[in-house]
Every structure is written in C-alpha cells, then in structure tokens.
Image: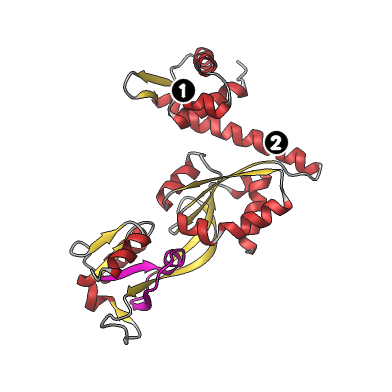
Amino acid sequence: MNLNLNHLNVFVAAAEKMNITEAAKALFISQPAVSKTIKQLEDALQVRLFVRDKQKGIMLTDVGREILILARQMQSIENRIFQAASRENQLLTGKVKIGSFPAASTLLLPEAISRFRAKYPQVQIELCEGVSDQIKEWVTDRTVEIGLVASPFAGFEHHSLVQDHMVAVIPDDHELHNIEIVDLGKYEQDMIYCKGGHEAALNSAVQQHHFNLESSLTVQTAETLIQMVRRRLGIGLVFDFTLSSVSHELIVKPITPVITREIGIIALSFAEISPASMEFVRMMKES
C-alpha cells in the first residue's frame, strides 16, 4: 500500500488542531475536504485515527497517537530531502521548527534568527514556546526538531549554550541590602521560589541541602516573583538567566550554597535533523 503524503499532512494538521474546521483554515482547504481526506487515510490503513465526540470534537485514538509521531517523522524526512536538494543548488529552503522557553526566546533567539534569516531568507522558522518539560516532550514526539531547554538533558543529544546560577532578589530598602551573599539556610522561610523551569535544580538543592519548600511561597514565572518581592512578601529566588529577561529595579544578590543549571539546545539526534536545522544549531553554538 502506498501512503499519500498529502493525506498524512492533513491528518497531522487535524491532530495538532484537534478541530476539523481549524485544520481546514490552516491548510486553506474546505472542511469537507479535510474530513474526506482523513476518512480516505483511515480506510487505507484500516484503523480509526480519531474518535468523534459531539462535545469535545475529535480525539486521537491510541493508534492515532502512534501514527501521528510517525507522520511527523515522514514530514521531517520530506523536509530534509528538499533541503538536501536545495543545499546542492546552494539555496537552503524548508522549515526549522524550534521549541523554546520564554527567557531563551527573549535572550538567545533574536540574534540567531536575525543572522539565520539574513543568510537563508527562503527558510521558514516556526517557534513553539512552553516550559522545558513541555519542549522535551515536543522534541520526543517530533512536534519540533530542536529545543532550547534547561538541564538535565538526559535522553537527548545536546549542546550547552549558557551556564546559569540562582540569585536572590530583594527590594532596595530590604534589611539584606548590605549583605554580600544571601545564605539560604538562614532565610528559607522567607523565600519566594520561582518554579517555572527551575524544578530540577530546586529539587536537587532540596535533597542536597534539605531546604523546606513546603513552608515557602512558590510561583511559576519571574514576572510574578518580581511582583511578590515588590510587595515585600519575601526574598525572591530565581535563576539569573530567567531574571535577565524581565525588566525590574530590584537588587540582585548571589546565594550560598550555589545552585546552577545549564541552558542548552537539544535534539533526539543532531545527525538526523534537517540541513536547515543543523545550520541553525551551528549558528546558536557560535552566538
């Protein structure tokens, strides 16, 4: 049986939108055309890819989820084929799909994208933003080819880009403004922890240094943490890289013990990503 790549592309669009109407809009075709194509694919494979529900719309079946990953792989291979041919003609084309968390998008991507687009104007860049754990899932299920994430990088090939460390954040009139280094052991009850993208490093610090996070205030974003510190609800604890992406007027102090992490770019296999993505990774490493 020969698979029709157009059928797979329609299936992927419907699976990602989880809505036939939205998929049709994204593909610039009619809703009946999307439904007909999916039915043809289901008939060809002799499986049900979606379960139709009057209230929830469409949902992937178990085999549908499995085929979605494989369909994305086929899309990636098709993209790589065209890019390899374009490279031979010295004109790189296609698409680079990148996952990134907001701080990395703000601090690392603009310069890299600017340089890349200047050299390869024919290549489309698609950016998906989330937290590091989401991005790792997207790389695993082929939603994106490469991802900018915080360590740990287990299960992925990676290139480290930034060595990051946690800092304490206080208002300018705080009693600690004359102290050079904030000892977490003395002030853990007053800490406001930023958990978004910081969980792995925080959990490691909890195990190693026996901090008590349960009795402290935890937030998800640096923006929220800054607002809490401004209201004098505690001492903010956040990674310096994340803090650098947010405008603020607060005092930043080093902490003890030192808590570190890495920011890196990951892929399931750098050898298997498209030529355009490979070139983007090269530029990121040189930035």
Residue that carries the numbered disc 2 in the rendered image? 81
Q: Nearer the viewer, residue 15 or 200?
A: 15
> On residue 20, which mark appears?
1
Residue 77 versus residue 137 in the image, above or below: above
* Residue 143 position within the rendered picture, expressed as x and y whole percent measured from the top left: 51, 39
Q: CA distance from mark 2 to mark 1?
A: 29 Å
* Residue 283 position within the rendered picture, expressed as x and y whole percent measured from the top left: 65, 58
Image-quadrant location for residue 166: bottom left
> On residue 180, which mark appears?
none
Residue 235 is a magenta residue: yes
* Residue 152 position within the rendered picture, expressed as x and y whole percent measured from the top left: 43, 58
Measuring 42% from the left and 21% from the top, which residue is drawn there?
50
Q: Nearer the viewer, residue 35 or 135?
A: 35
Q: What range of the chain is rendered magenta?
A: 234-259
Quadrant where the C terminus sits is bottom right
Which amino acid type is shown beneath numbered disc 1?
Ile
Q: Nearer the viewer, residue 171 or 269?
A: 171
- Which element type, helix, strand or loop, lies under badge 2? helix
Measuring 60% from the left and 20% from the top, which residue is drawn there?
3
Residue 74 relative to residue 229: left or right = right
Q: From where the camera sits, is residue 95 visible?
A: yes
